[in-house]
Amino acid sequence: MGSFQGASSSTFSNTKLQVAFTPAFEYNLFPYSESTRRELRFLYRIGARKIQYREETIFDKTEETLLGHELSVTLETTQTWGSIEFSLEGSNFFHDFSKNRLTFFAELEMRLFKGFSLTLVGSYSRIRDQLSLTKGDAETEDVLLLRRELATSFEYFSFVRLSYTFGSIFSSVVNSRFGN
C-alpha cells in the first residue's frame, strides 16, 4: 500500500494548478526476493484531483474536482542479455465512464557488450479523457510552440537509445515497489 501525490501547472494542458492525491495498492505475483529478476505487478490507484484551469474548457469549466481510478499490469524481467518490460494501463473518471484512457507500453534493453546497451521503447494510447481542452480555436503559433493542447483520440511514441554505463555494480539497486 502507498500513495501518489502531486501538484503541477501547465500552459500546454491549460492547468493553472492541479493537485492530486491517490492511495494505491500493489500486488506482485512473484515474491519480493525475485523482484530484481522478474515482476508481474498489478497496481490500482483511486483518488481525487482538484484542478484550476487557465482558460475556460470546452466543457465550460474554470475549475473542478475529479474522482477517478487506474489499473495497470506490468511485466518486467531482467536476464543476463538485458531486460524487457510490458505494461497495460487503463483509467477513467467516475462522473463519466466514457472519459477514459488505455495505454500500452513496451521496452526492450539488450546488452551488446559490457556496459554498452541498445534500448527500444514504444507506447500507444487511446485517449478519451481530455477534459482540460481550451474553448475556442487554437492559434497556429501556440500549437507549433506546444503552448496549447489539441483534441486527439490517440498518442504514440517510440525511440531508440544507445547507452554506455560504468561505475559501481551496486548503482542500480533500487526499491522496485510502485514501478520505481
Image: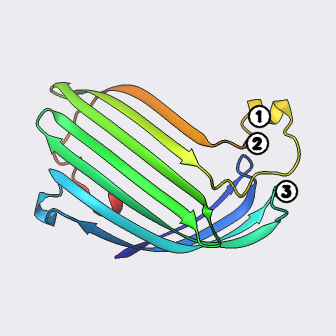
Res 27 visible:
yes
Q: Marks 1 and 3, how far apart in space?
A: 16 Å
User: Is the residue 151 above or below the residue 144 in the image?
Assistant: below
User: Is the residue 133 above or below the residue 99 in the image?
Assistant: above
- The amino acid marked with disc number 3 is Glu
Q: Residues within 10 Å of mark 2 (few under 14, many from 20)?
A: many
Q: Marks 2 and 1, how far apart in space?
A: 5 Å
Name the residue at 25% across, 56% down: 174
The percent position of residue 6, horizontal first and vertical second, equals: 56, 66
Query: Left or right: 102 with respect to 173?
Result: right
Q: Nearer the viewer, residue 102 or 48?
A: 102
Name the residue at 37% across, 27% down: 161
Name the residue at 81% across, 57% down: 57
Res 180 visible:
no
Callouts 2 and 1 close, C-beta under 8 Å: yes
Dot 2 or dot 3, earlier in sequence = 3
Judged from the image, the secondary structure of the residue bearing numbered disc 2 is loop
On residue 148, which mark appears? 2
Q: Would you name the residue on which mark 3 appears?
A: 55
Q: Nearer the viewer, residue 49 or 93?
A: 93
The percent position of residue 65, horizontal first and vertical second, equals: 69, 74
Q: Residue furthest front?
A: 98
Q: Residues within 10 Å of mark 3 (few under 14, many from 20)?
A: some
On residue 171, which mark appears? none
| Quadrant housing the C terminus | bottom left
Q: Would you name the residue on which mark 1 appears?
A: 143
The percent position of residue 145, horizontal first and vertical second, equals: 74, 32
Query: Left or right: 97 with respect to 169?
Result: right
Name the residue at 88% across, 47% down: 136
